[in-house]
Image (spheres, grey):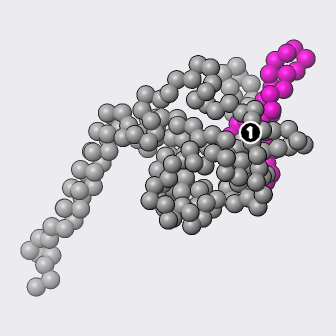
Amino acid sequence: MQIAVNIKNSNNERKYEPLASDIYQGVCVDVEDMGWKETSFGWKGFIKIYFETYVDGKPMLAKTKRLNAVISQRSTLYKLLKKWLGEELDTAKSLDLTSLIGKSATINVEDGEPFKNNEGDDVEWSFIEKLKPCKEDVEPSGTYTPVTERDGYEPPAYSAFSSGPPEAQEEREAKLAEAKAKRESSNEVSEDEAPF
C-alpha cells in the first residue's frame, strides 16, 4: 500500500513517504478493479481497497496489497473483510464491494520490503495488513480522486469480477477436467482391491 504524502523537495521533485506502521482509524474511499493478471499460480482477478486516515490532521492514503477478487473462507479477501464486517459478511448472499466506500475501519498498517524502481532508487512502501470495526465514524477529506476518475484511466480489458480472458477460462476448464479425471480414477476399484 504504497501511498502517503506527496512532498516536493528543493528541486521541485515529488517524494512519496509511506504511511508509518501503526494502527489508524480510517474510512474506505475506493475499491480498484485491477482486472485479470497472469501469475505463477495461473490467471487471477485482482482488486485493491483504499482507505483514508488522518495523521496530525492531514489526510493520508493507505491501501491493501492486491487481493484475489474471490470471497471464500480460504481467501485473503474473505479473511480481511471478515474481521471488519463480521456477521454481515457471512449473512450476505452477495457483496457489492463498492458498498464498502464510506465505511469506517480500524486499519493496521505494516511496512513492505523496500524495492528498486525503474530509476534504481529504493522505494519504501506500506500496506494494510488487517482491518477491524471502528468505534468512531471517520469522514473522508474529499481530496481523494477515485482511480476510475483520474486522468488517463483506462478500465481493465476484463473486470476482476468477470469470468476473465479466454486464456483464464481455458485454464479453469482444464483444471476442472483434470480434477474430475483424478476423482474418477480414484473411485475405480480393481478386483484385487475389492474387500470380498
Question: In which quadrant will I find the N terminus?
Answer: top right
Q: Is residue 109 above or below residue 144?
A: below
Residue drawn 55% across and 52% down? Answer: 77
* Three-letter code, disc 1: Leu
Counting labels gives: 1
Residue drawn 75% across and 29% down? Answer: 122
Q: Is residue 18 magenta?
A: yes
In magenta, the rendered stretch is: 1-23
Image side of residue 11 versus residue 96, left or right: right
Residue denoted by label 1: 61
Seen as rendered, the residue at the extreme bottom is 196
Give residue 70's position: percent from left, percent from top.
47, 50
Give residue 134's position: percent from left, percent from top.
73, 58
The answer to whether any part of residue 148 appears in the image is yes
Residue drawn 71% across and 54% down? Answer: 105
From the viewer's side, name the closer residue of 189 and 23: 23
Give residue 2's position: percent from left, percent from top.
70, 36
Mark 1 surroundings within 10 Å by alpha-carbon count, few (fewer than 14), some (14 through 19), many (20 or more): many
Seen as rendered, the residue at the extreme top is 11
Looking at the rendered structure, the secondary structure element under dot 1 is strand
Q: Is residue 131 above or below residue 33?
A: below
Image side of residue 139 versus residue 178, left or right: right
Q: Is residue 9 magenta?
A: yes
Give residue 107's position: percent from left, percent from top.
72, 52
Q: Quadrant of residue 76?
A: bottom right
